Image (tube, helix red, strand yellow):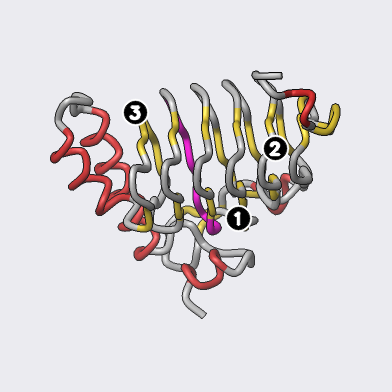
Amino acid sequence: MTEKEKMLAGQLYDPADEELVALRQKAHALSKQYNDTLETQEEERDAIMAQLVPERGENAYLQGPVQFDYGIFTTIGENTYANFNLTCVDCAPVHIGANVFMGPNVSILTPVHPMRWQERNLFRRADGVKTDHEYAKSITIEDNCWIAGNVTICGGVTIGSGSVIGAGSVVTRDIPSDVFAAGVPCRVIREITDDDRMEQ
């Protein structure tokens, strides 16, 4: 397996691999280009995003600034919106559904590092390049979710369709569909029901 294949499969991989370094550098450059545009520069933004996150549904919109580690390992559904400062470290696949709302400063973080420093710290490969041991876990945000501001979503998590994640939460485990969940760590507070209708 290549290091990219290992990474996407959730296995230990070498992030200093030349292919991965080149892909990250491209994504970081595209993120900066996107961030340097005005929201009125719709054609320029769309052209950049077509390279950065090519798997996007119609009318998906990222306000910017954004920061992707790879971009190409993220899919975004139609009518999804992200407010300022979306960070997506997509070392494993990230699936964001349709009609998802994300507030400012949302972080989607797939990487996982070994708990023991003896396995986490930098070391030199036989060719002299410094690297470390990493692995990553996929993240899924299903359709019709609202992820409020300053939420962090950790690797391996699925957030079920129609759920709302309260501001400032750190999501470390799966959240079922159609619930309001919040906290550090994030936990289910209650179901979302017809009593939550804006019009009675």
Type of amino acid at the residue the image marks with label 2: Ser
**Residue 163 within the segment the image draws in magenta:** no
Q: Residue at x 45, y 58 (%)?
A: 73
C-alpha distance separating marks 3 and 2: 24 Å
- What residue is disc 1 on? 134
Q: Are marks 2 and 1 in contact (CB under 8 Å)?
A: no
Element type at mark 2 = loop
Percent across and percent down for residue 24 are: 36, 51
**Residue 135 visible in the displayed image:** yes
- Discs 2/1, front: 2
From the top left corner, tell me how far across and down residue 6 is, in percent. 56, 70
Which of the two discs, 3 and 2, sits closer to the camera? 2
Left or right relative to 54: residue 180: right
**Residue at 30% from the left image edge and 50% from the top image edge:** 52
Q: Nearer the viewer, mark 1 or mark 3?
A: 3
Mark 1: few/some/many CA within 10 Å (<14, 14-19, 20+): some
Q: Amino acid at mark 3?
A: Gly
Which of pointers 2 and 1 lies earlier in the amino acid sequence?
Answer: 1
Magenta range is 85-93
- Contact (Cβ within 8 Å) of mark 1 with mark 3: no
Residue 31 vertical position relative to residue 116 in the rendered view, above or below: above
Residue, disc 2? 163
Marks 1 and 3, Cα distance to the nearest angstrom?
A: 28 Å
| 3 sits left or right of 57 in the view | right
Quarter of the rendering containing residue 8: bottom right
- Label 1 residue SS: loop
Asked whether 148 or 183 is in front, the reply is: 148
Closer to the N terminus: mark 1 or mark 3?
Answer: 3
